Image (spheres, rainbow, N blue to C red):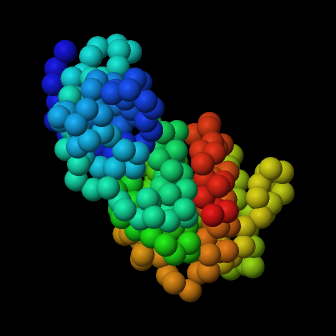
């Protein structure tokens, strides 16, 4: 057993007893940790009054070999992301981001760039529903990129040639991107040119607010649904929390 220090975001938690919790924490350097926090809700404990969902903190954990749960020994709160406690839209979107992380990576598999993207996404959340969907699209895109499933949206995914200008394209999960001919894959989805341009802007964006404001919430919802379908096919599981976030 070894003790390690890191920072992390709580993406799932359950009450284990009146004073203790079991947790799923996405740590920047240590990856996804399944933890038990004994006595975390006791006033004198080193857990900032208990570990809350969608909160970021400095942590100390005792790592155990095999499938044994990690023991969380301290949790020093750094960011609580108050918007997710005040806005239903922000809360649902934050939970969707947490679900994306849960389905994207394995235990103890570090993804520091994905962690940084989650933190940026949570900071972008607020009362504005359009901004929240933009943050979700950005985090979903980053998760696909960081897991090696970047969608090909700049060239023909089948031929690697240029995509001719068109009003709509076909997106094939099997090919991993766009193609001008929907007869190539009978299961391909028709995608508007507006959605393609939005995704290209998302690929260039360094943060959610960099996605151009000319795209309405409806455009962002279409992009989120497309990326969710591709995520399901590429990763092999579906973050079901995305659905409610697009309706909030």
Quadrant of the drawing holding the C terminus = bottom right
Asked if one can make out residue 9 in the rendered structure from this viewpoint, the answer is yes
Residue 223 image-quadrant placement: bottom right
Residue at 42% x, 77% y: name it.
210
Q: Is residue 200 left or right of residue 51?
A: right
Q: Is residue 86 left or right of residue 9?
A: right
Q: Position of residue 177 (x, y in %)?
A: 63, 57
78 over 137 or under it: above or below: above
Counting the numbered discs, the total is 0
Residue at 54% x, 62% y: name it.
88
Q: Position of residue 38 (x, y in %)?
A: 28, 24
Residue at 56% x, 72% y: name it.
129
Q: Nearer the viewer, residue 119 or 180?
A: 119
Q: Position of residue 238 (x, y in %)?
A: 63, 42
Q: Nearer the viewer, residue 168 or 113?
A: 113
3 over 12 or under it: above or below: above
């Amino acid at each position: 057993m070894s003790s390690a220090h890191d920072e992390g975001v709580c993406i799932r938690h359950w009450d284990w007893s009146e004073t203790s919790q079991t947790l799923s924490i996405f740590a920047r350097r240590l990856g996804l940790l399944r933890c038990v926090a004994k006595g975390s809700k006791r006033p004198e404990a080193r857990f900032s009054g208990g570990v809350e969902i969608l909160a970021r903190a400095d942590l100390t954990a005792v790592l155990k070999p095999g499938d044994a749960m990690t023991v969380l020994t301290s949790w020093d709160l750094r960011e609580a992301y108050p918007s997710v406690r005040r806005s239903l839209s922000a809360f649902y979107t934050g939970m969707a981001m947490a679900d994306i992380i849960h389905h994207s990576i394995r235990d103890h598999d570090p993804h520091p760039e994905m962690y940084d993207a989650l933190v940026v996404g949570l900071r972008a959340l607020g009362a504005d529903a359009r901004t929240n969907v933009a943050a979700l699209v950005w985090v979903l895109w980053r998760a696909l990129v960081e897991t090696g499933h970047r969608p090909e949206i700049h060239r023909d995914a089948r031929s690697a040639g240029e995509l001719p200008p068109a009003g709509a394209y076909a997106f094939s999960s099997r090919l991993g991107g766009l193609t001008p001919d929907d007869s190539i894959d009978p299961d391909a989805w028709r995608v508007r040119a507006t959605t393609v341009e939005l995704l290209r802007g998302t690929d260039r964006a360094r943060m959610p607010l960099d996605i151009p404001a000319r795209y309405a919430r409806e455009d962002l919802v279409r992009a989120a649904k497309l990326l969710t379908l591709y995520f399901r096919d590429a990763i092999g599981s579906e973050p079901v929390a995305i659905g409610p976030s697009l309706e909030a």
